[in-house]
Every structure is written in C-alpha cells, then in structure tokens.
Amino acid sequence: GDRGCDDRGVLFTERAIFAGMGVKPGDGDTRPGDAEPHSEVARDNAITRGLGNRFQTIAGSAFEVDFGSGYHLVLLPNFLHHFDPPTAERFLTRARAALAPGGRAVTVEFVPDEGRVTPVPAAMFALVMLCTTAAGDTYTFAELDAMFRRAGFSASVLCTPGPAGPQIVISER
C-alpha cells in the first residue's frame, strides 16, 4: 500500500481507522458525542492532500459499529483517556480484531511518568479528566501497555517527541 508522512509528520496509510471523539460510554449506554465536526475536518484534510477518494467515515458507536478488517493502522489520538481501563480494553480488543497481521495501533496521549507528577502537562491533564469524565484518567506507559496486552496486542513502545506535549504509544498486533 502507499504509506508516507506529510510535511508535519502525519502518517498516511492505505487502510487506517481513526478513532475520534465520537462516543462516551455512560452508565451502560453509549451516547453520540461530537464526532461530526471532527469527521468534516478530517474529510477536508484528506481532500486537500488528494486522498478524498480513499476517505470514508463509519458512523456509530466506536464500541458497537463494525470496523471491518484488514487495516494496517488504527489511530487513537486523545481517545483512551476518556474511559476507565476495562472500557478502553473493550475498545482496544475490537480495534485489534480490525487490524491485519502486522498491523499497529498508534495512540497519542498525555502519559505521566510512574510517579504521576511529571511531565507537568500530563499531571495537569489528569485533573481535567477527574473533573470532566465519569471514569477517565491519564495513564502511565505501564498502564497503557497492560491495557494493550490484555486486549491481545503483543508489544508497545513509548515515543516522546517533545519535552512537554503528548506522547505516542505504538502497539503491535
């Protein structure tokens, strides 16, 4: 397939799932979130980069909709922190099932160190999650790695592109 990065390092791949701000599970249910504006921005970006004919959205709950299969990549930017570990693992199990052999999940999150007080933006974001979600949190790399492993992924690595921003976790199917 064709893979490459744009001038800002954004990876494009032939078959990818992008999990956006679509749903937030409540007390046993899922409610629609604000996915549509994000989908429109993503669609506009794909068209601008000449990829509009390969872009599609899948409407519905990320916890229920059929993703299909054979994806090379699942993109999870700013998604897992909205959920408690069991809910995140339920989603990750579904995401893994949609990946082709050798596929990867790329997660972008604020990842605090094991002491949970640095980097400062990650520690501060944990407070935001405490105040604005029913069960969300920031997760250490060890916690994220354990969630991915319980969901069936074989290995994860942590990449830190800068000193204060979010980190990237790359997980192998």
Image (cartoon, rainbow, N blue to C red):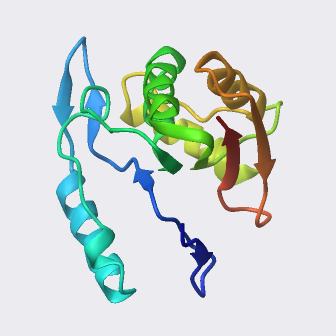
Q: Position of residue 122 (x, y in %)?
A: 66, 47
Q: Quadrant of residue 90?
A: top left
In the displayed structure image, the side of residue 95 where residue 66 appears, left or right: left
Q: Position of residue 44 (x, y in %)?
A: 27, 79
Residue nearer the viewer, 62 or 54 = 54
Which residue is at a point 26% across and 75% down the rendered structure image?
53
In the displayed structure image, the side of residue 70 where residue 66 appears, left or right: left
Identify whether 121 is placed above or below 32.
Answer: below
Q: Quadrant of residue 141?
A: top right
Residue nearer the viewer, 169 or 81 = 169
Image quarter where the C terminus lies is: top right
Which residue is at a point 49% across and 23% down the rendered structure image?
93
Which residue is at a point 32% across and 69% down the rendered structure image?
54
Q: Position of residue 146 (x, y in %)?
A: 71, 21
Residue 118 appears in the rendering: no
Q: Position of residue 65 (x, y in %)?
A: 24, 32
Identify whether 29 is placed above or below 118.
Answer: above
Residue 24 appears in the rendering: yes
Identify whether 153 is placed above or below 70.
Answer: above
